[in-house]
Image: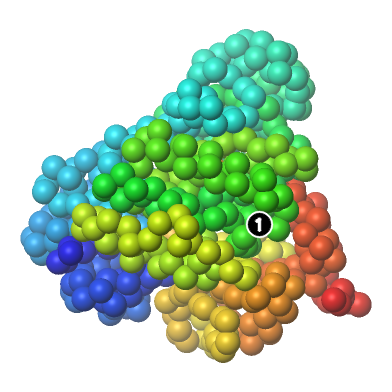
Amino acid sequence: MLNCVLVANRGEIAARILRACREMNIETVAVFSEADRDSLFTTLATRAVCIGDAPAKSSYLNQDALLTVATHCGCDGVHPGFGFLSENAEFAQRVCDSGIKFIGPSPEVISLFGNKNRARALMREHGVPVVPGSDGLVATVDEALAIAEGIGYPVLLKAASGGGGRGMRNVFSAQEMQQAFETAQAEALACFGDHDLYLEKLILNPRHIEVQILGDSQGNIVHLGDRDCTLQRNHQKLVEEAPSHVLSDETRAHMAADALKAARAAGYESAGTVEFVVNKDGTYYFIEMNTRIQVEHPVTEMVTGVNIVREQLRIASGLPLQFTQDDIEVKGHAIECRINAEDPENGFAPCPGTIDRLNLPSGYGVRVDTVIHPDFVVSPYYDSMIAKIIVYGRTRNEAILRMRRALEETLISGIKTTIPLDYMLMYNPEYISNAIDTGFFERNLAALLRPLGEGAEF
Ligand code: ADP
Ligand code: ADP
Ligand code: MG
């Protein structure tokens, strides 16, 4: 088993990983920026080391500092969490070169899936359906126009190195192509240092459904069922559920088999997620594979009983999976609300500041992943997600009722959060009847912002 793990992240996901290590008697090193000096996650580690100033570039993205601390503290593993360096193949390689285990897949696999265009090609080769689109990169506006003409509008320009919903532009007609191409390219270059674009047909009103994968170093690969992450804003997930309630048994089985195919094609090790967009008729297409722990992994943990971070640590220690596919049973339903420090009434502007009063929900079937507390300062330097509220129910309806109750108990004052929206969502008739697609949230924003009226009851 690994002896000492450096957690190269912050906030709730750092806490999530540190807690798992502690339960496994693995020593830990937390790293923190000057802005996070007083953050709770630093106290959950055996040791905590300041690695730089508040801006992520000076701290959580500072590879030299992270490697120095890992080596100096005698760490034999580095867990990158999500965001930051979690999908950076160069960092993974440098960790390996230092004789330390990177807790995730190999640098080659990260690099392969990090380029979504190459990932598409690999999936095609292995018979996994991909969204109709370009065969490779699209280098010029003229090329994009020709491909779009062939597959028909609307289309979606996407950054090959994209993530976090960035570097994507819808294109509804030839007239829009030039500008969309230029802005997508500029955003891709600014966000990812790579302006490469590819093109997909824009699937209208799809759902986003993904499959959780776990593979060990012996080549055993299992899936832990699916998650429905259809509720999005700006291509970013807001509320996630497990399992999806719109898949037929047959489609679910096919999708899981295709996700396994994708993982096997790459010789996948550790936890990963294969993402699909799904049409109303159940046809689905691979969009990308995320080679890291996912924000929404707790909903899968709730319905399978598998501690995914623990499994990542066991796999990284060279241990085989202790279960086979037949042992995995999906039971009940789980819902996660991401709580963001943002003002929904003001274009979701980030709302850093000090939390003065705080009450977090608890009780039967409720899990809260967070490091906030009264007097906690939400920093302007990082992602605005400050907590995740996760509930479990025997059925989806029971989970919705429990989420309402959990959100009613939740009080976060001093800053604005997305909680009122989540609460309204739990009363929205279309959400309750699960008649949603990825555009649902943005289309219904005005209604969701209105205070609760008659409400929908079961
Ligand atoms: P997931 O499917 O795991 O939710 P996301 O693409 O939503 O993946 O984001 C993963 C993580 O990447 C986020 O939790 C956050 O830490 C980081 N991230 C998300 N959006 C952005 C962004 N706009 N800029 C930088 N990092 C981001
Ligand atoms: P990221 O790396 O930023 O997460 P994805 O390729 O996963 O990028 O796309 C983000 C979101 O955009 C998806 O969850 C889905 O809602 C939407 N999306 C992506 N590709 C398509 C497509 N071809 N048609 C319609 N929606 C898409
Ligand atoms: Mg994605």
For image coordinates 34% across by 48% down, the residue present is: 220
Q: Does 435 appear above or below 144? A: below
Of the 4 image quadrants, the one containing the N terminus is: bottom left
Would residue 323 be seen by someone viewing this image from the given angle?
yes
Number of other residues with Cα within 10 Å of mark 1, as a class: few under 14, some 14 to 19, many 20 or more? many
The x and y percentages for residue 145 are 67, 14
Camera-nearest residue between 91 and 332 = 332
Would residue 414 be seen by someone viewing this image from the given angle?
no
Q: Amino acid at mark 1?
A: Ser
Quarter occupied by residue 359: bottom right
Say left or right for 122 vs 238: left
Q: Does 296 appear above or below 117? A: below
Quarter occupied by residue 181: top right
Camera-nearest residue between 285 and 153 = 285
Q: Secondary structure at mark 1?
A: loop
| Residue topped by disc 1 | 244
Of the 4 image quadrants, the one containing the C terminus is: bottom right
Say left or right for 175 vs 410: right
For image coordinates 18% across by 72% down, the residue present is: 27
Quarter occupied by residue 418: bottom right
The x and y percentages for residue 404 are 71, 79
Camera-nearest residue between 390 and 182 = 390
The x and y percentages for residue 227 are 59, 56
